[in-house]
Amino acid sequence: MHRRFRTVLAGLTATAGLLLLGVSGTASAASAGMQASKTARPISDFVSTQGSIPLDEGPTLGGEFIVGKSFIWGNSLSQLFQVDYSGANAKALVSVGGPNPNTSFAGKIAEQRLPDGQALDTIQLKTTNALADMVNASTFPNNCSNGGRVTFIACPVIFGYSPIELANGIGRPLLVTSVLDVTLVNTAPGAPIPDLVTVLGNSPSDSVAYVKTLTLQTTAVGPLRSAFGVPDGTRGQGSLNVTFDISQSLDNEQTSLRMLGK
């Protein structure tokens, strides 16, 4: 059976896809409320709630690397792509004396009240100077530990430099522009926008906030690493294209990585 991998960084196992049982064909309140008037909310209402679950990813030269839980994406454990669309890794990196990527955010949120009292939030986020890297986790949990802590971001890096490496003065940040579009049903108009880690995969039948659709794209040019089978620093290009649609049971996390010509 073909499996899709969306791995929460702190998880000690590779979480395979989503269980989208009983959701196709669901007549949700979201579709019934599309004619409701929209209220604008600042994009900070989304960014500020991401990375809400703190994780200790092990020691660095500047102290323990405490970072907000986030996703690392890919259809295969051999090419997992991490893009810091919420700035959680940037915040953690600066806190231990690492380089400041000056991550910035632009976007908007449109909110509609639904007939059942919930809210439909349409979120558009463009992140500039987002930290990015790719790892090979095919041997996980082997070769994926930092100071005794097993974590995906400590797996062999194949593109760019991991936050742990950067915190230890190794390499330079690989910075990208990412575009994230999300539609989610929230518990009520004006309610805090939930952390995606806590709601991506919820079902409409759960009577909690859930994600209807999500897309995430980025492309980067930067250094390949020796774990990719080339000399360290070889110029390469990596890309990430995520498409999620709960109504279609669709969860596609496409990554690619290749060496660029001389």
Image (spheres, rainbow, N blue to C red):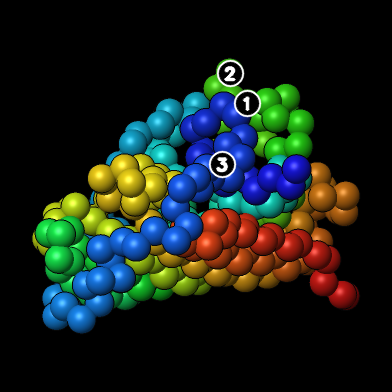
Q: Are marks 2 and 3 in contact (CB under 8 Å)?
A: no
Q: Is residue 183 visible?
A: yes
Rendered image quadrant of residue 104? bottom left
- Look at mark 3 in the image and give the residue it sits on: 7
Q: CA distance from mark 2 to mark 1?
A: 6 Å
Q: Nearer the viewer, residue 248 or 233?
A: 248
- Badge 2 amino acid: Gly
Q: Nearer the viewer, residue 169 or 59?
A: 59
Q: CA distance from mark 2 to mark 3?
A: 20 Å
Secondary structure beneath dot 1 equals: strand
Residue 173 x/y as whole percent: 56, 57
Q: Residue at x 43, y 28 (%)?
A: 56
Q: Are marks 2 and 1 in contact (CB under 8 Å)?
A: yes
- Look at mark 1 in the image and give the residue it sits on: 145
Rendered image quadrant of residue 40? bottom left
Residue 229 x/y as whole percent: 88, 49
From the image, which quarter does the C terminus lie in? bottom right
Q: Is residue 90 visible?
A: no
- Look at mark 2 in the image and give the residue it sits on: 148
When the figure is inspected, residue 102 is found, relative to residue 152, above or below; the finding is below
- Disc nearer the start of the sequence (2/3): 3
When the figure is inspected, residue 123 is found, relative to residue 56, above or below; the finding is below
From the image, which quarter does the N terminus lie in? top right
Q: Residue at x 74, y 47 (%)?
A: 2
User: Closer to the camera: disc 2 or disc 3?
Assistant: 3
> How many residues crowd mark 2 within 10 Å: few (<14), some (14–19), many (20+)?
few
- Badge 3 amino acid: Thr
